Amino acid sequence: MFLLLLSLALNASCVDGNNTCQNILDVAIIGSGPGGLSAARALHHITGLSKVVVYERASAFRPIGAALGLNTLAYDTLKEFGMDLHDRVRSIGSNPQRHVLQRPSGEIIYDDESFLANTDFNWLAWYNLQTALRVAAEGDADTGGISIQLNSKLVDFEEDEEAGIVRLHFDDGKVVHTRMLIGADGYNSIVRGKTVDDGKPIFTGTMTWRGVMDRSHFNKIVKIEPFKSIGDGVNLSIVGDAKTFWVMDCGEGQIAWTGTAIYNNENSADKHAPANIKALNVFKNWPPIIETLIEATEASAIVESGVYDREPVSSWGALKGTFKRTTLLGDAAHPIRPSLGLGSTLAFQDSKCLADNLSGVDLGNTENVANALKLYEKERIDVTTPLQKKARQEGADSHAENRAEPMKALLDASLATKKKTTH
């Protein structure tokens, strides 16, 4: 195992003074989030590519305090990457059984079965999903398929059409040669900066604060309904005053919380304060469970981030013909507000579409690779563009002053529809 990983690492970092390399990667992927790791798995599992390397700028994989939702579309796509991975990802989530909706005053206006109960929908911790994908990738290393390299910050790249490669330059001076480059490096993508060149992402005016804690610790500190006696599978939403605060079971014995608000950090009096202090101030005088959760979460583990998106574009690099061996995937391609809960699902679908279009393609033939990437971009841009626009609108609507009543009406209607169709 060690010798195999060493061999892959040497293959992935071939450098010489003449810019020639006998060991050329099939695919280099920038970014080790769910998009990048699922792309690596799909390209190896579906197309059989044997030299796939994922480059990550971080020095280690660390738990991140965030949760996400996966539905039938996500799980159906994961099946295409191997039932072992599908089953593992299913096993680490939590299906919401009950939903409680409160106003900031603490008034409970909805307390009933979740309309998502006993469906394919699960909440799960972002880090647990990343870990499942990473472990699957490391398993593929045993068959000579995938390698993950940390401490690898891409700073530039160029396509060499004559040599049929993409030349990657990293901040430590390393040069890598690959047949294809996939930018899966998020909404601040270095790759997108060159293939699309559309400047910085657009700040939506919304900030989020997120945390994850063990359920055992949660049970000790939270002594109020609805969590005191109901057990796993409860979702709590507190909505009003153009803010939202969610608490949910996210599987593997963990509880996640997320607060969102319209917030301009530059104009805030506490812009230099730690994330926990900002969150406490934003949700001051809201139900006490919020203060309890924020204070019980290690300050350094709270994730504070702005919500960004971008205008949809007509090409991610290949479709307009500027690049023939480079494209984008996931948030690097179509950064989307979290209001639809589709970020990871779309990345999985990107990965499958990319692998399907590259199946059987001779990576040494530039025009064949370019045509495959054009088909991939066309198919996925047609799908993701309307979803980006819809997510932007729903994200704005989610911070309306009177959001609680429309949300209650939606929960009532969705549960009534579910009961009608299941009886």
Image (tube, rainbow, N blue to C red):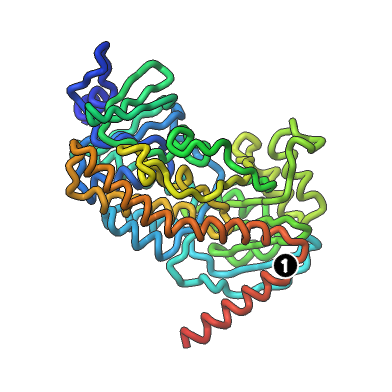
Regarding residue 70, the answer to whether it shows in the image is yes
Q: Judging from the image, what secondary structure is the residue with disc 1 in?
A: helix
Residue at the image point whose x is 78% and y is 55% from the top: 286
- Tag 1: residue type? Ala
Residue at the image point whose x is 61% and y is 68% from the top: 99
Which quadrant would residue 265 be assigned to in this image? Answer: top right
Position of 348 with respect to 97 (left or right) is left
Please rate how many residues cluster around mark 1, counting C-alpha atoms within 10 Å: few if below 14, some from 14 to 19, many from 20.
many
Position of 265 with respect to 364 (left or right) is right
In the displayed structure, 211 sits above or below 228; it is above
Residue at the image point whose x is 42% and y is 25% from the top: 156
Position of 385 with respect to 112 (left or right) is left
Please name whichever residue, 149 or 359, is drawn nearer the observer in this view of the structure.
359
Rendering coords of residue 2 (x, y %): 23, 27
Regarding residue 185, the answer to whether it shows in the image is no
Task: Report the quarter where the N terminus lies.
Answer: top left
Farthest front residue in view: 321
Residue at the image point whose x is 33% and y is 56% from the top: 78
> According to the image, label 1 marks what residue?
404
Rendering coords of residue 283 (x, y %): 76, 50
Farthest top residue in view: 17
Please name whichever residue, 329 or 125, is drawn nearer the observer in this view of the structure.
329
In the displayed structure, 67 sits above or below 143; it is below
